[in-house]
Structure formats: C-alpha cells, structure tokens
Image (spheres, rainbow, N blue to C red):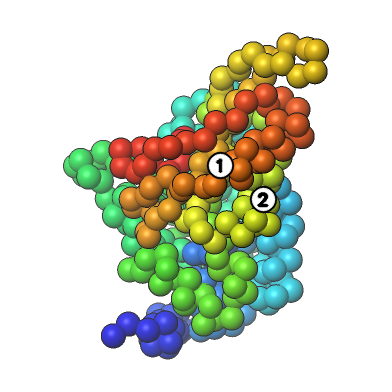
C-alpha cells in the first residue's frame, strides 16, 4: 500500500541516483506542489539544489514576501527571489485572450528563469511540481493537438536549455502531495492552502491586465479569503477565488449614482479538482463579505456568487 513515508524514502533515493553530483534548479510558485517537490529534492541532495521564486506581478496581496520568508526562514530552502513584475505586466499590456495570456506568462517566465541561471552552467536538471491531473488535462480529451488549456507547468521548456525534468509527484493527486508535504515538515497552514494557478490573477481579470485592476482584485480576494479563514470556512472548501469581470453596472452609494465593476466570487468543493461542486457557503457569510467588498474596495459596486459546477463549467473563469 502507498504511504507518504515509503513514497518519500523511495523518491529521495531515486532523485539521488538520478542526479549524482549534478545540480538541480527548481521554480517555486508559492503553491503546495512546487514547494513539496523542492523539499523532496532538498531532502535528497541538499544544496546541490537551487530554487527560484519569481514575482510575476500576478500574485495575491503580500504573497511574494510572505512566501519567500517561509521558504528561507522556515524551510531553509536555497532560494533566490526575483521581482519580474514589470516584465510580465509589460508583456501582457492590452492582451485579453486568456490563452494568449497563458502563453505570454509562460514565455516571460522561461526568459526570467533562463536569465537567472544563465551564469551558471552546472544545472543539469529541472524540478517541477506537475501533478497527475495536470498531466491528464494537458494530454487532451479531444485529440493530440487540442488541449483544454495550456498549463504552463507541464512540458514547455525550450530544448536549448538542456535540462532534464524531475517530476517526482507526477503520479500523485493533490491530497497525496499534501500528505507527503506534511511528512516533510512543511507547516500545516501552508499545506492546506488552496490551489492557485500559475498564471495567477492574470487569468482572473477577464480583460486586459493593468496595475489598477490587479490592485482592485487583490483587495477583493484578500477580503474573501481572510473572511473564509476567520470564519473557519477556509478548510471546508477546495478552492476559493475572486474574479474581476469586465462588466460595469449602475449602483447607488449615498446620494450618488455609481458606474463601477462587478466582482465574482467562486468557492468549490472537490476531491481532485477534476470535477467540482459550487460550495454552499452560508448566506449570512456571503452577505457579510459582499458588504465588506462593496464598502471597502473603491471601483466595485456589485458582487455576484458563482453557482456552477465543473463540468460543464471550470473552476477558473479565465
Ligand atoms: P479548471 O479551471 O480547469 O482548474 O477547472 C482546475 C484546477 O487547476 C488550477 N489551474 C492551474 N494550476 N497552473 C496550475 O498550477 C495553471 O496554469 C492552472 N490553471 C488552472 C485551477 O486553479 C484549479 O485548481
């Protein structure tokens, strides 16, 4: 039978054998999967590992610094933090198509990553947090070339980088990865974090991405997520997120007519992210969060809650 302990033991051994005296570079995303992978590799080969954590400007509020601190101070991972938000936002200027956004974000990531390791030719391997559902969803349900969407953490590295992939959790589901992470001593609060897509808030703004919209969405998201936490609902859902719709509508605030944006909130229950039901959050909770958002976030005058399940909807709106 599968246990986290035996998985760790055999995987650490395999990584050691595979890597030998070479070096491994690992991109950290701030999520559970890449963190578990980096910790596994670190367990296997210590400081032959170099991690890179890129701020793509599309992370949640204060996320970059918080997570970088965790990596450095609590997990002792050898990590280099790179703020590349200007580069990402510049490349995304005016782009509205979600697949184009994904491609751009993926490509800029590769450029930044490549640049970061270009001075050091000793890297032979790349560690990646690819999960089993990522592999399945990227393989396509429709035929070899029609993928549902491009996951920027599957495949996708230019061959001239000459790195071999290490994907130790490629056959695992999220809950198994979480168990492995716990056994590796990653704090429970971090392990229980909801999934967050690589392209981040970039695909949760359903129009062109600007700094102003990002600031707005960050505030909405922060209110939603922190209220879920403080009202003990965070762990009850698989994932919760906020979306900035490209729709403006009329409202009244005080004596004034407003014409502002709509935010959509989505929370789902799921086992593996492949199917999901919308979370039946208590109405008083939704009312409270909606009130806070509309009162505290200038630019939003309407909040809607998504009551669709996957399939036929997806978890993200894109
Ligand atoms: P969908 O929207 O397809 O999402 O129902 C399923 C799960 O995958 C997450 N997701 C991603 N995760 N890189 C990731 O690491 C990505 O590019 C990506 N796109 C979607 C999504 O948040 C949900 O948990």
Secondary structure beneath dot 2 equals helix
Which disc is residue 115 wearing? none
Judged from this view, the residue extending furthest toward the right is 255
Name the residue rendered at 56%, 68% in the picture: 191
Q: Residues within 10 Å of mark 2 (few under 14, many from 20)?
A: some
Which disc is residue 283 wearing? 1
Query: For residue 159, what is the image quadrant?
Result: bottom left
Residue 121, position as x, y percentages in the image: 56, 66
- Note whether residue 229 is visible: yes
Tell me the quadrant of the picture where the N terminus can be found.
bottom left
Judged from this view, the residue extending furthest toward the front is 284
Give the number of callouts.
2
Query: For residue 308, what is the image quadrant?
Result: top left
Q: Is residue 41 above or below residue 94?
A: below
Q: Which residue is mark 2?
A: 227
Q: Is residue 213 left or right of residue 41?
A: right
**Nearer the camera: disc 2 or disc 1:** 1
Name the residue rendered at 61%, 67% in the picture: 190
Q: Is mark 1 within 8 Å of ligand 1?
A: no
Name the residue rendered at 29%, 55% in the picture: 136
Q: Earlier in the sequence, mark 2 or mark 1?
A: 2
Query: For residue 35, what is the image quadrant?
Result: bottom right
Residue 232, position as x, y percentages in the image: 61, 60
Query: Looking at the image, do the residues carrying marks 2 and 1 touch, with CB atoms under 8 Å apart?
Result: no
Q: Is residue 62 left or right of residue 209?
A: right
| Mark 2 to mark 1 CA distance (whole Å) | 13 Å
Residue 131, position as x, y percentages in the image: 39, 62
Q: Residues within 10 Å of mark 1 (few under 14, many from 20)?
A: few
Say which of 210 and 105 sits in front. 210
- Note whether residue 134 is visible: no
Residue 52, position as x, y percentages in the image: 62, 61
């Amino acid at each position: 039978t599968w246990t986290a302990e035996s998985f760790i033991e055999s995987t650490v051994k395999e990584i050691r054998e595979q890597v030998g005296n070479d070096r491994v570079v690992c991109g950290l995303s701030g999520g559970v999967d890449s963190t578990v992978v980096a910790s596994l590799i670190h367990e296997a080969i210590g400081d032959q590992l170099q991690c890179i954590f890129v701020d793509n400007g599309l992370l949640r509020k204060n996320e970059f610094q918080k997570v970088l601190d965790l990596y450095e101070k609590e997990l002792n991972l050898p990590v280099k933090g790179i703020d590349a938000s200007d580069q990402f936002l510049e490349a995304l200027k005016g782009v509205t198509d979600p697949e184009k956004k994904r491609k751009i974000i993926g490509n800029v990531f590769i450029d930044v990553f490549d640049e970061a390791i270009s001075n050091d030719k000793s890297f032979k391997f790349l560690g990646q947090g690819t999960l089993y559902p990522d592999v399945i969803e990227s393989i396509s349900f429709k035929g070899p070339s029609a993928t549902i969407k491009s996951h920027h953490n599957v495949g996708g590295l230019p061959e001239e980088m000459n790195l071999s992939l290490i994907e130790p959790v490629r056959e695992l589901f999220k809950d198994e990865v979480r168990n492995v992470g716990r056994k590796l001593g990653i704090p429970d609060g971090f392990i229980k974090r909801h999934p967050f897509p690589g392209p981040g808030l970039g695909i949760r703004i359903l129009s062109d991405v600007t700094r102003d919209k990002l600031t707005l969405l960050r505030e909405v998201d922060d209110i939603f997520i922190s209220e879920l936490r403080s009202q003990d609902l965070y762990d009850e859902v698989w994932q919760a997120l906020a979306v900035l719709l490209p729709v403006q509508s009329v409202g009244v605030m005080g004596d004034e007519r407003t014409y502002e944006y709509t935010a959509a909130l989505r929370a789902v229950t799921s086992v593996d992210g492949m199917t999901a039901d919308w979370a039946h959050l208590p109405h008083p909770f939704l009312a409270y969060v909606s009130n806070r958002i509309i009162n505290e976030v200038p630019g939003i005058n309407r909040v809607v809650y998504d009551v669709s399940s996957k399939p036929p909807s997806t978890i993200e709106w894109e």
